[in-house]
Image (cartoon, rainbow, N blue to C red):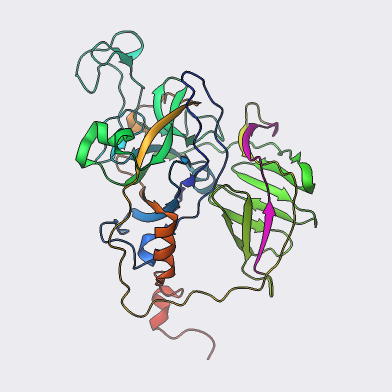
């Protein structure tokens, strides 16, 4: 999902079992395909449509699964540093404060809730906990490759996993803002006023996996070397480059990421190939950069299967009945995950006053998303010729 050269990837791994005070490793990568609301007329009326700097998407989910948000692709798309405010059902994921109009905030001297001076290390006696320094995550503070958020910030170095649930009693937003909560996520991107210095990037090193696949990392993308010698480059958004064809291809994984479907746009007679991969995990990898972290996959086996290209979906030409409603799904705070929200050393004047873009992520059950997609799609891309579409072009 992208807006103005900023991006967020939606991952949906299985929920980690909460075992009390145990601190768990990062959940695995489970990329979910996102759909632009404006392209699907069957979307419910209450879902926000894209407008100005706001782009609205929807994502199919599975009840009782976890989720995490990946922002690393933004650093490959923009030349600026980024501060990201995450709203979960109308609640800031870092502070737990209501989050209606996104803005950057820092807490240096007093508690934003009680307006009283902090004790040591931003400790508020009234709240009985220490506050984070800011209400956002920042590329300036977060180590390269760590720009993601797996849950609600609990304490320094701990987040509670986002868990998708139908239980209102487990809803974080219900407990904080009650009926003012929404059934969507909001991600607001604030760019720095100045471009960030260009880094010197050493070569990456891949890791050989069982089944003949090699997975490695380069900046914020991942690449694989297949059994046939082909190389694919997979980014957090799910876009893949394929050296055997040089054309762009579409990448999609199922809920458990056991199979990856890749649709090659310019390969005659070939539509998809699936790679079985299990035991996916995020792990520390030696990529030539100290402390570099990537979510990687291991594979017990790998196989290629090919099928004829499917017929493209017809563009909707008649009025489409909208989905009246979707099942209300809440977002709970699950097991503890070992993850930090790093303090930003910059002041608020380091960033632009208004967000460069906002991504709204509506979510619904897979069956509901399937009905929306099957109802039809409209073209919102417009003419590729721009203003030239109405004037003479080409040779005489």
- Identity of the residue drawn at 19% across and 19% down: 114
Tell me if residue 103 comes above or below residue 183 in the rendering: above
Q: Which residue is drawn at 33% across and 32% down?
A: 349
Chain part drawn in magenta? 271-288
Instruction: Determine whether, in the image, residue 98 is placed left or right of residue 190.
Output: left
Indicate whether residue 78 is drawn in magenta. Answer: no
Most foreground residue, 141 or 277: 277
Whole-percent x, y for residue 368 in the image: 39, 59
The answer to which of 223 and 22 lies nearer the viewer is 22
Q: In which quarter of the image is residue 153?
A: top left
- The answer to which quarter of the image holds residue 112 is top left
Q: Can residue 98 be seen in this view?
A: no
Task: Decide: is 347 above or below 90.
Answer: above
Q: In this view, does 387 lie above or below 261?
A: below
- For the question of whether residue 233 can be seen, the reply is yes
Q: Where is residue 271 in the image (x, y as percent from the top left)?
A: 65, 68
- Residue occupying the point 79% across, 54% down: 227
Q: Is residue 201 left or right of residue 332?
A: right
Q: Quadrant of residue 353?
A: top left
Rendered view: 143 above or below 66: above
Please give left or right for residue 58 compared with residue 395 in the image: left
As drawn, which residue projects farthest toward the top? 120
Of residues 246 and 211, the one nearer the viewer is 211
Q: Position of residue 307 (x, y in %)?
A: 68, 70
């Amino acid at each position: 999902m992208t807006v103005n050269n900023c991006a967020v990837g939606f991952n949906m791994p299985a929920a980690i079992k909460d075992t009390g005070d145990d601190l768990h490793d990062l959940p695995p990568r489970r990329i979910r395909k996102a759909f632009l609301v404006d392209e699907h007329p069957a979307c419910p009326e209450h879902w926000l449509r894209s407008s100005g700097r706001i782009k609205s998407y929807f994502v199919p989910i599975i009840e009782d699964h976890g989720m995490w948000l990946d922002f690393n692709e933004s650093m490959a798309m923009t030349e600026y540093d980024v501060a990201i405010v995450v709203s979960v059902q109308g609640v800031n994921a870092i502070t737990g404060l209501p989050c209606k109009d996104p803005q950057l905030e820092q807490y240096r001297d007093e508690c934003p809730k009680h307006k009283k001076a902090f004790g040591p290390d931003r400790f508020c006696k009234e709240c009985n906990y220490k506050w984070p320094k800011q209400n956002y995550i920042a590329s300036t503070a977060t180590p390269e490759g760590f720009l993601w958020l797996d849950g609600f910030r609990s304490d320094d170095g701990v987040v509670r996993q986002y868990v998708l649930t139908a239980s209102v009693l487990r809803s974080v937003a219900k407990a904080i803002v009650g009926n003012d909560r929404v059934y969507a996520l909001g991600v607001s991107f604030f760019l720095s006023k100045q471009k960030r210095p260009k880094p010197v990037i050493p070569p990456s090193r891949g890791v050989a996996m069982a089944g003949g696949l090699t997975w490695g990392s380069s900046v914020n993308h991942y690449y694989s070397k297949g059994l046939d010698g082909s190389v694919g480059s997979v980014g957090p958004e799910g876009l893949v480059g394929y050296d055997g064809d040089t054309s762009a291809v579409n990448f999609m994984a199922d809920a458990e990421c056991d199979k990856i479907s890749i649709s090659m746009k310019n390969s005659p007679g070939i539509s998809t190939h699936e790679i079985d991969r299990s035991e996916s995990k995020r792990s520390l990898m030696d990529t030539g950069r100290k402390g570099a972290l990537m979510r990687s996959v291991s594979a017990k086996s790998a196989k290629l299967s090919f099928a004829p290209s499917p017929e493209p979906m017809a563009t909707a030409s008649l009025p489409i009945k909208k989905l009246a409603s979707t099942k209300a799904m809440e977002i709970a705070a699950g097991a503890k995950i070992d993850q930090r929200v790093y303090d930003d050393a910059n002041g608020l004047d380091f960033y632009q006053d208004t967000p460069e873009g906002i991504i709204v992520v509506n979510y619904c059950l897979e069956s509901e998303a399937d009905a929306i997609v099957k109802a039809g799609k409209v073209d919102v891309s417009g003419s590729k010729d721009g203003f030239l579409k109405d004037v003479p072009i080409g040779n005489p």
